[in-house]
């Protein structure tokens, strides 16, 4: 069997096939990450200085444009972290979900241009020099491969790899969000779960994603907060509807309380049941 071009190339190709508004470029180790223009290096965002200021200016302008008023600084920072973390967490969870491979991507291996023309979710450039995989995977012969014993060991690799990347980012965004510790990790937990839950639906594999995520985040997996928290509710016509209980709030209600997402922790059950069919249809 021929070896893949990289351990995650096929996974990223499949991701961008179902989300064409997101581009992912893998770079060789010797090539520096792109900089300047709209590129926001993850390490710069984690540092909390000028790179983060420039990154959040985009959210500030978007809120003012779309809502006709400025958002609170903590709300803008929360939006910015969400819009970074949602696609970036997919860099880890999609290869795990599709091919049972987990890349290590510390902050100095990722940069993000969400202003890229023609791309709704922007352009990620990454260096993937090491990854975990299972015994028998052909990719185990690639440079940087680290074979782990079984599925649970691989799930531990997902949790560790995401935490390694997100911990510095939470430290950079946290003071502006006016959140610490558990509240920040609750948001990271939601990004891990809801990103792959959504993408798996585009793959036609959402039920499997629910099962996998319940094993990935069963609870008591610090620093993550709580479990994947999936459950079913009964829809307006008696139909079962899949939902989950978020561990955090994105603060969108501060701009439009009537248009909060169906998993918003501020929504009552009746609101959730009303919104879920429309969200599934869209």
Image (cartoon, rainbow, N blue to C red):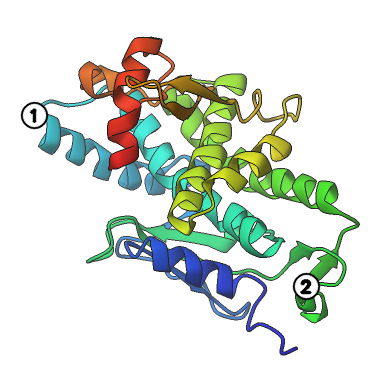
Q: Are marks 2 and 1 in contact (CB under 8 Å)?
A: no
Q: To which quarter of the image does residue 146 belong?
A: bottom right
Query: x, y (%) of residue 11?
Result: 57, 67
**Label 2 vs label 1: CA separation?**
49 Å
Instruction: Say which element carries label 1.
Output: loop
Instruction: Say which element carries label 2.
Output: loop
Considering only vertical position in the picture, is 183 above or below 163? Answer: above
Question: Residue 68: which disc?
Answer: 1
Q: Residue at x 27, y 40 (%)?
A: 59
In the image, is 240 to the left or to the right of 102?
A: left
Question: Residue 21: which disc?
Answer: none
Residue nearer the viewer, 224 or 76: 224
Where is the C terminus found, in terms of image quarters?
top left
Question: Residue 144: which disc?
Answer: 2
Considering only vertical position in the picture, is 83 above or below 189? Answer: below
Q: Residues within 10 Å of mark 2 (few under 14, many from 20)?
A: some
Query: x, y (%) of residue 207?
Result: 57, 44
Query: Taking the image as drawn, is residue 33 in sight?
Result: no
Query: Taking the image as drawn, is residue 30 in sight?
Result: yes
Q: Residues within 10 Å of mark 1 (few under 14, many from 20)?
A: few
């Amino acid at each position: 069997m021929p070896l893949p071009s990289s351990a995650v190339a096929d996974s990223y190709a499949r991701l961008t096939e179902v989300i064409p508004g997101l581009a992912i470029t893998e770079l060789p180790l010797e090539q520096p990450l792109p900089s300047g223009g709209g590129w926001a290096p993850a390490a710069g965002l984690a540092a909390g200085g000028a790179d983060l200021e420039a990154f959040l200016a985009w959210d500030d302008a978007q809120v003012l444009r779309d809502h006709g008023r400025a958002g609170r600084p903590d709300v803008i920072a929360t939006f910015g972290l969400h819009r970074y973390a949602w696609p970036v967490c997919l860099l880890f969870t999609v290869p795990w979900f599709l091919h049972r491979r987990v890349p290590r991507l510390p902050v100095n291996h990722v940069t993000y241009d969400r202003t890229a023309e023609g791309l709704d979710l922007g352009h990620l450039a990454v260096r993937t020099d090491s990854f975990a995989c299972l015994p028998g995977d052909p990719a185990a012969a690639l440079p940087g491969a680290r074979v782990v014993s079984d599925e649970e060991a691989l799930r531990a690799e997902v949790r560790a790899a995401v935490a390694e990347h997100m911990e510095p980012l939470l430290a950079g965004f946290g003071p502006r969000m006016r959140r610490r510790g558990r509240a920040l990790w609750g948001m990271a937990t939601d990004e891990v779960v809801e990103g792959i839950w959504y993408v798996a639906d585009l793959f036609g594999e959402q039920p499997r994603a629910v099962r996998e995520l319940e094993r990935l985040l069963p609870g008591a997996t610090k620093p993550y907060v709580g479990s994947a928290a999936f459950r079913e509710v009964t829809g307006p016509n008696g139909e079962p509807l899949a939902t989950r209980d978020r561990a955090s709030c994105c603060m969108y209600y501060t701009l439009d309380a009537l248009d909060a997402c169906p998993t918003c922790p501020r929504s009552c059950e009746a609101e959730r049941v009303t919104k879920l069919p429309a969200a599934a249809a869209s």
